[in-house]
Amino acid sequence: MSDKASSLAYHRSVSSSTSSLSEMSVDPDYTPDFDLGMRVETQQLYRLNDRSPWNESDPETTVKATDVEASSYAQECALIVRREPHPITNQIALHSITIQSPLIKKVLDKTFKGFEGVSTQLTQLTFKAPFHPFYYRWHRFEKLWEDEQDQETKDHLDLLYPILSEEIMPHIKTMEDLTNNKVITFDYLWSIFAPSMEVYTMLDGQDRLLELTHSRYGANMGGEFFTLECRYIDCDGLSFGYVLSSVDIDKFEGVKKLVELDAFPSHLRPDIESMVDRLHVRGEKLEQLNGFHHMSYSGFYTARSSRQIRKRHVCNKVFLLAAKF
């Protein structure tokens, strides 16, 4: 498999699992030395492939994952780290990290405040490679780690930080090198699109600013693509609300200028402030059209039905109720 094809294959591999990563049972007859997640140690688990059980050390051992993870030692450890052969390089790589330490969770609660898709209240909080949530909030997490004053919490964080740093920092350095040169590769599109960020694109020939909800790599008969799932405010003629919209960026070779992408972070536009002013004016005009009006219009409009959306052209059409068109 080529390097260019590695992104989709890797993202597919880490998003699938044959069993739950966080369901664990405890021996009811055992008296633990530490409360759940309070032992300042890491339990390492390995497996040969996604059909093999998680083993404590030697991949050839017959110890089952349920036995290992149910052990009192694993339950007490601050972290459970799982590794398996990388789908591309076949070298042992991180698969996931389960965070059991309540002290780390308190820090992560601050790290991921306002970040959709992460709940730090789970008993076993599991993050899977390639750890995108940590990438998007890395500087915040790093600052909290550096500033932590409680020594016990710091000891717990010191288990997690070096593991994640080894995974995250190479991506950050690559992204910075690319963006400093105002270009990006297809494989690194994910690195510049953080959830909830403002994205610029063109829809129906008009400038649009969208709020990104999430992104993903995909493929169909036409090839690979990167999809941005977004939302923006629109009106149905009676009320305003969010409308969902997606933008696909088709796979490309080599590097591409950031501002030549079909969609890109809005702050990269040199005229973003003046464009926002223009969009505010356009939005105010749209608001004024809300409700009942007698007006003439020539041009295209969008005809929607339960099955399809079509563009139609009208000339001097009289609109009586905006909600009907």
Image (tube, helix red, strand yellow):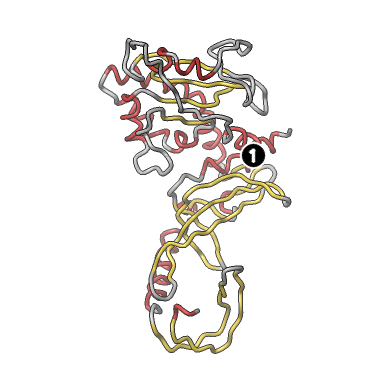
Residue under the image location 58 percent in, 50 percent down: 227
Q: Element under label 1?
A: helix
Q: Position of residue 323 (x, y in %)?
A: 45, 78
Give whichever of 151, 45 is nearer the camera: 45
For label 1, the residue is 8
Q: Residue at x 39, y 77 (%)?
A: 290
Name the residue type under label 1.
Leu
| Image quarter in which the N terminus is found | top right
**Residue 30 position (above or below residue 165):** above
- Which quadrant of the figure has residue 33? top left
Is 211 situated above or below 16? below
Residue closest to the far left? 150
Is residue 268 depicted above or below 80 in this figure? below
Q: Residue at x 54, y 89 (%)?
A: 316
Q: How many marks?
A: 1
Q: Local crowd at mark 1 within 10 Å, few (<14), some, or many (≥20)? A: some
- Where is residue 120, by image quadrant? top left
In the foreground, 323 or 91: 323
Residue drawn at (52%, 21%), measured in percent from left and top? 82
- The image shows residue 12 at horizontal and vertical percentages of 62, 37
Identity of the residue furthest to the front in this view: 29
The spot of residue 219 in percent (x, y) is 67, 47
| Residue 104: image location, x then y, percent | 35, 25
Horizontal placement of 179 versus 26: left or right? right
